[in-house]
Amino acid sequence: MAEVTSGASLLEQVGAVGRRAVTRTLRQRALLIFPMLFPLILFAINGSALSAATRIPGFPPVSYRAFVLAVPFMQGALFIAVTAGIDLARDIESGFFNRLALTPLRGSALLAGQLAGALVVACLQSVVYLLVGIATGVGIASGVGGAFVLLVLSILIAFGLAGVGALIALRTGSGEAVQAIFPMLFVTLFLSSASLPRPLIQVRWFREVATYNPVSYLIEGIRSLVITGWDARALAMGFGFALALAILSLGFANAAIKNRLVRT
Amino acid sequence: MSGGGAAIVVEQLVREFRKGPRAVDGIDLTVSPGEIYGFLGPNGAGKSTTVLMLTTLLPPTSGRATVGGFDIVREGANVRASIGAALQEAALDPILNGREHLLLQATLQGIPKATRSRRAQELLERVGLTEAADRRVGGYSGGMKRRLDLALALVHSPRILFLDEPTTGLDLQSRTALWAEVARLAHDEGMTVFLTTQYLEEADTLADRVGIIDHGKIVAEDTPANLKAQIGNPSVEVLPADLGSGDAIAEALTRFGTPIRGGRGSLTVQLPGGEAQLAELVRVLDAAGLHVASLHLHQPSLDDVFLAKTGRKLEGAADDLGDEPLAEKPARGRRGRRG
C-alpha cells in the first residue's frame, strides 16, 4: 500500500534537482572545458591581432587585451545558455521530464534546480577568465573588490542567459531549436561594443545598433571594472540590464514550465 | 472508492488531438485491486494515450476516470500519489548511476531522508541491480534500464502500477525476468498493474484480464482463456518436406477441413475434433506416404482473437505461447508495432 510520505520541501526539491544538474555538469568534462576554452582562444587571438585598435584616437589608454577581457565572460555566458537549454530539452525529449512530472515536484523547484548546473559552470568559468586575464598582464582597475563585483555581474549575466536557454527549451521541447538560437545570440555579441568603444564605431547603423543593444551595456559594465575603476553609470546599466534579463527570462521560463508540466 | 472498490474505473474516456482522429474513442473499463490488466493493441491503437490520461499527464477530451478512487482531472495530485509509472522507453539520465536515480526519485516523492538510502538499496536488490548500482546508467543494457525504471516506479510503494510496453526491445531472458517481478508485485503484494503491450505472449502470460484496443476502441475484453475459447479449435500448420507434394498434402488434409496455404508452401487446417485429432492427421499423412518438414499445432491465440475482432493480425506478432512446436520451427519475429 502507498507509503505515507512527508512531502519534500521546496528547498529539498531544488536541492535534489540541483544536485543532479551539478553532477551532470561536472561529469561531462568535454561540455565544461571546450565551451570555456573557445572564448579564451578568441581572447588570445583578438587581444594581440587587433591591438592596433588602441592607436585609434579616443581609444581608452589601456591595452587591447584589457579592453576585450569582458568579451570571454559574455561568450562563456552564451555557451552556458545553450548548454542549459539543451540539457532541459533533452529531458523533455527523453521523457525524463514526464518522470519528474509524476512526482510532487513544483515547477519553480525544477527550474531553479536545473539552472543550478549553469550557475556552477558560470562561477567556474568566470573565475578562470579573470585569472587568465590577470595572468596575461591585465590589471583590474577597480581592485580586489572590483574583481569580486565583476564575478557577481558575470554570473548574473550567465544566469539570465541560462534562463533564456531554458525558456526556449521549455517552449519548443527541442534541443535542435535551442542549438539554432546560438548563432542568433552570437550575432548580438558582434553587434555590440565588444570590439570597439561605441563612440569610435565609424559605421553609423552599427553604432546605433550597438547603442540599442543591451549586450553593449552588459559588456561595458564588466569592462568598466577592468579598465576604468568604479564607474557608477556603467555598473548601474550593466547590473540593471543583467537583472532585467534574469527577471524576464526566469519569469517567462517559470510560466513556460508550468505549461510544460501539464498535470491535471 | 468509486466503481465498487475498483482500482481503475474508466467511463467513456475520449482523447482527441488537433488535426487528428480520436486517439481514444469512448473506452470503458474497470480494473480490480490486485489485478493485472493487459491492454493489448498495435501501434497507434490508443494504448499510450490512455496511460497518459490515467496517469494525469494528459487531460481527457471527455469522459471520466478514477484511479485509486481519485478523479484523474479533479484530483490529479492524489492520483499521482497512488500510482507508479514506467512509461514507454525507460526515461533515465545516462550520466547518473542507478542509485542516484533512486535517491532523486525518493527525495522528490517525499520519502523521509533517514530512509531514502535504505529504500534505494531495497529496490536495487529487488530488481537485481545491486552490483550495477554505482555505474552510470548510460552503460546499462536495455533490460537493466527497464528494471531500474520499474524500481523508480516503486519508490513510494504505490498501490497501482502503470507499465507502458515495459518489455519492448528486450531479449527473452530480460523479458521473462521482468514478467516474474510484475507477477510477484500483483500476486504477493496485491498491487494493481495496468500493462500495455504489443506482445501477445506478454498479455497471455501475465494478464488476469486483457482488453484489446484498436483504433481507440476496446474491441474485446475478458480473461485470455475466455477470449481464446471464443475462437474455437486449434489448427495444425504443415510444412511439406518437398514443395512438390503440397497439393497431395492439401488433398489429404481436406478430410479435416479446408486447408489454407501460407508462406513457404505451408498448409494450415483447423482440427474440428480438437487436438485429439492430431494423431489421426499424422496417420493420414503417413498412410499416404507424404513427408513433412514440420508440424505445428496452434492453440487459439490472442492473435486469432485480434484477427477475429479486427479482421487483421497484430503485425509481426505471429508466434504465441499457445503454439506448441512439435518439430523444427523456423524463428520468426515477435515484435509488433508500437501502440
Image: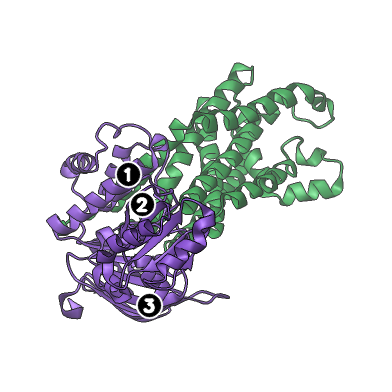
Could you tell me residue B93's position as x and y percent?
41, 43
CA separation in Å, label 1 and label 3: 30 Å
In this rendering, is residue B265 above or below B121? below
What's the residue type where badge 2 is placed? Answer: Thr
- Residue at 65% x, 49% y is A180
What's the residue type where badge 1 is placed? Answer: Ser
> Do marks 2 and 3 share a subunit?
yes
Q: Nearer the viewer, residue B302 or A97?
A: B302
Disc 2, disc 1: CB below 8 Å? yes
The quarter of the image holding the C terminus of chain B is bottom left
CA separation in Å, label 2 and label 3: 23 Å
Residue marked by disc 3: B219
Disc 1, disc 3: CB below 8 Å? no
Disc 2, disc 3: CB below 8 Å? no
Judging from the image, mark 2 belongs to the subunit labelled B
> Label 3: how many residues lie within 10 Å, few (<14), some (14-19) or many (20+)?
some
Residue marked by disc 1: B174
Q: Nearer the viewer, residue A209 or A234?
A: A209
Could you tell me residue A215's position as x and y percent?
66, 45
State the residue lying farthest toward the left: B188
Residue marked by disc 2: B167
